[in-house]
Image (tube, grey):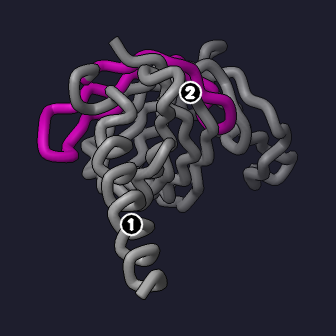
Amino acid sequence: MKRPILLTLATAAILSTGAYHAQATEVGTSRTFGLGFQIGEPTAITAKAFVGGGNAFDFGLGFGGWGYYWCRDANGNTYRCSNWNHDISLHADYLYQENIVNMTNRLDWYAGLGGRVIMWAYGSNEIGHDVVILARVPIGLAATFRRPRFLEAYLEIAPALVVFPPLDFTIDVGLGVRAYF
């Protein structure tokens, strides 16, 4: 007889703590605008604005990064000649975000669609183009915390198709943190 009572009490305790933790973080509910920093490709100042129902817009102003610096050899062939480049970039994405784990801290996954424009800070990127345009599909994990309730950390991978000038494929990877207001 003691076993069913203990099992019932344990189940009630787990369910009641789950209800408490469902509102443990304020990110995306009472705090809908976040501002932060990302390292990787692009290294950027980022912003995210929730517009309701798990939908958000993500923006970034990037300053350099890895993977886009191209050079040209004597025969006119292009190759990636440096791991760090000197560019300025802008990206904007529409994201759909869904919860995976909602306990003391919350873990969400997200996916979206967007674009990125890269402009070389010192003129041409040595293959004759000052601007590159990409179509991106960001996929990521975002963790929010009970303390502090306004903080989000995320890891994002964004496969991207270079649509101008040369057709190419690349992957943006970023690790970042945002504070929500």
Q: Which mark is residue 149?
A: none
Question: Residue 7: image x %, image y %?
Answer: 43, 77
As helix, strand or loop, the secondary structure at mark 2 comes to strand
Q: Amino acid at mark 1?
A: Leu
Residue density around tag 1, few if under 14, some if 14–19, many if 20 or more, within 10 Å: few
Query: Residue at 13% across / 37% down in the picture?
Result: 52
Residue located beneath label 1 in the image? 9
Instruction: Give the residue drawn at x 33%, y 42%.
Output: 20
**Residue 32 lies in what quarter of the image?**
top left
Based on the picture, tell me whether residue 37 belongs to the magenta stretch. Answer: yes
- Where does the C terminus fall, quadrant-wise? top left
Mark 1 residue element: helix
Tell how many labels.
2
Q: Closest to the observer: 55 or 84?
A: 55
Residue 70 in the figure: left or right of residue 148 = right
Query: Residue at 27% across / 32% down in the picture?
Result: 28
Residue nearest the observer in this picture, 173 or 67? 173
Mark 1 / mark 2, whichever is N-terminal: 1
Q: Is residue 137 above or below residue 82?
A: below
Q: Which residues are the magenta region?
A: 32-58
The residue mark sitting in front, 1 or 2, is 1
Q: Nearer the viewer, residue 82 or 174?
A: 174
**In which quadrant will I find the N terminus?**
bottom left
Asked if residue 7 is among those painted magenta in the image, a careful observer would answer no
**Rendering coords of residue 148 (x, y %):** 51, 21
Q: Can you say whether 135 is above or below 7 in the image?
A: above
Residue 174 horizontal side relative to residue 100, left or right: right
- Which of the 4 image quarters holds residue 34? top left
User: Which disc, if any, is residue 177?
Assistant: 2
Picture coordinates of residue 80, whole percent (x, y): 78, 48
Q: Main secondary structure of the magenta part?
A: strand
